[in-house]
Image (tube, rainbow, N blue to C red):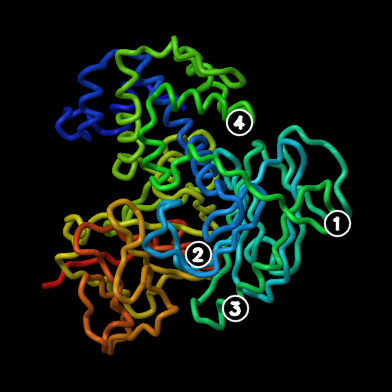
Amino acid sequence: MTITRRAALGGLGLAAGAAAMPPALAEGLRLFEGIEDFWTASEAYIFGYPLVTMEMTRRVVTNVPAVQGTRGPMGHIIKLREYPNSSFRDVTAPNADTLYTTAFFDVGREPWIVSLPEMNGRYALFPFLDGWTTVFQVPGKRTTGTGPQTYAITGPGWTGTLPAGVTEYKSRTNLIWMLGRIYCTGTPEDYRAVHALQDQVKLQPLSTWGQAYTPPPGTVDPSIDMRTAVREQVNRMTAVEYFTLLAQLMKQNPPAPADAPALARFARIGLVPGQDFDASKLRADFASRIPAVSFDRIMVQFRVNPAVKDINGWGFTTRTGIYGTDYLMRALVTAIGLGANRPQDAVYPTSLKDADGNEYNGANRYVMRFPPGQLPPVTGFWSLTMYDADYFFVANPINRYSISARQPLSRNPDGSVDLLIQHASPGAARESNWLPAPAGKFILMLRLYWPNEADPSILDGSWVIPAASKVG
């Protein structure tokens, strides 16, 4: 996919002038109009955003000596024992519906074997993401059932023989992120049941197969920033820092064959797969503006990308998990929902504005009404999650970050269901339907897990998502 200046202007719908553009993008266009290298560098930035973000996420998550809460060393299984809370900052747009069972590992030297236990019919999925955020395999209830399963994750150059009963999943990168999710209602009893399942998930290198295996402790790098959100760390890199890291990462995590035309263009700014970044080819007079302009181009996709549907103010796409050469969509999903599933497993409608087109604000009250019989048509589950303006959970007095059929939702006399979205409690009698909001701006996200295969209305966009309407 070529993203020239002309294509960028037309695709972003900005021919009417710079006034409608994000400020950083408008300034970039004014200063560098006609400089093709600038747009090539911006295209390269967008292209590499997922791989750089995955690496920075890996660094933060694995920079501990042993598993501690949401973090654990390379090759260790991280078992979230309860839902993340409002202090969680490792990944944007976390969920509060499933307990994660995750691990980062590297298959550059040898394959790693993952064993999943008997799930007894419980909804679960274990997507494997490569370094470019592609979900290359996703065992789970929808695809492979809930019985015991064993897989070997092999790297791009590996050839060999696997033990009997082990299925090969080949990755095109060395960096792997297993991002398992097991549905949990959040009650003490269900927590215990899911914990027992998590404890039976096993991860080990092929060379230890058939032996008792304990992963070695991790090594802590004190230079890694463990406090700043990953997205902020990525976005504040200079262009030279960013492309230098990207070039190093591509040595072990090669791009796809389909990326060859884009990579041929990137050579003119010093970015060549398998080689160090040549900063002398990046024009110093515009390098400082590449990150901000490129990130604006990523985020504006919410408004202009034709693959993003808009139903009653809910923007969503069914092009997650597998992206091909749609680098802008891949970067957008990385920025707002790193680790997103394939659409057959989950769709994530997101709303930034109410039914009147105004930004959400906790100073107001809102209602999302589902007509009788029109709750989301899913086989797995659905939920509505509250985020602040940066896609993180919102602290609230009842520690509720999402609302779903888990709650004993009350119905109106006609059978419709109202979700009450507001800062203050609506009162004890209506609190079961309350999704707490912050005092200021916020964002809403629906999670629609395993859209009903007998009713394709979610995937084809014909199911009408109710608007969140401001009430007096």
In this figure, which residue is indicated by the disc labeled 2?
449
Q: CA distance from mark 4 to mark 2?
A: 28 Å
Residue 306 lies, with reference to residue 291, above or below; the image says: below
Mark 1 lies on a secondary structure that is: loop
- Look at the numbered discs 2 and 3 and tell me whether their residues touch, using CB distance below 8 Å: no
Residue placed most toward the observer, 413 or 50: 50
Query: What is the three-letter code of the residue carrying label 3?
Result: Arg
- Look at the numbered discs 4 and 2 and tell me whether their residues touch, using CB distance below 8 Å: no
**Mark 4 vs mark 1: in front:** 1
In this figure, which residue is indicated by the disc labeled 3?
192
- Marked residue nearer the N-terminal end (2 or 3): 3
Residue placed most toward the observer, 124 or 239: 239
Query: What is the three-letter code of the residue carrying label 4?
Result: Ala
Where residue 392 appears, as percent x and y from the top left, is: 36, 56
In this figure, which residue is indicated by the disc labeled 4?
256
In this figure, which residue is indicated by the disc labeled 1?
211
- Marked residue nearer the N-terminal end (3 or 1): 3
Q: Quadrant of residue 416?
A: bottom left
Residue 109 lies, with reference to residue 45, above or below; the image says: below
Q: Residue placed at 17% from the left, 56% from the top?
A: 358
Q: CA distance from mark 4 to mark 3?
A: 42 Å
How crowded pointer 1 is (Cα within 10 Å; few <14, some 14-19, many 20+) is rated as few
Mark 2 lies on a secondary structure that is: strand
- Marked residue nearer the N-terminal end (4 or 3): 3
- Marked residue nearer the N-terminal end (4 or 1): 1
**Mark 4 vs mark 3: in front:** 3
The quadrant of the rendering that contains the C terminus is bottom left
How crowded pointer 3 is (Cα within 10 Å; few <14, some 14-19, many 20+) is rated as some
Query: What is the three-letter code of the residue carrying label 1?
Result: Gln
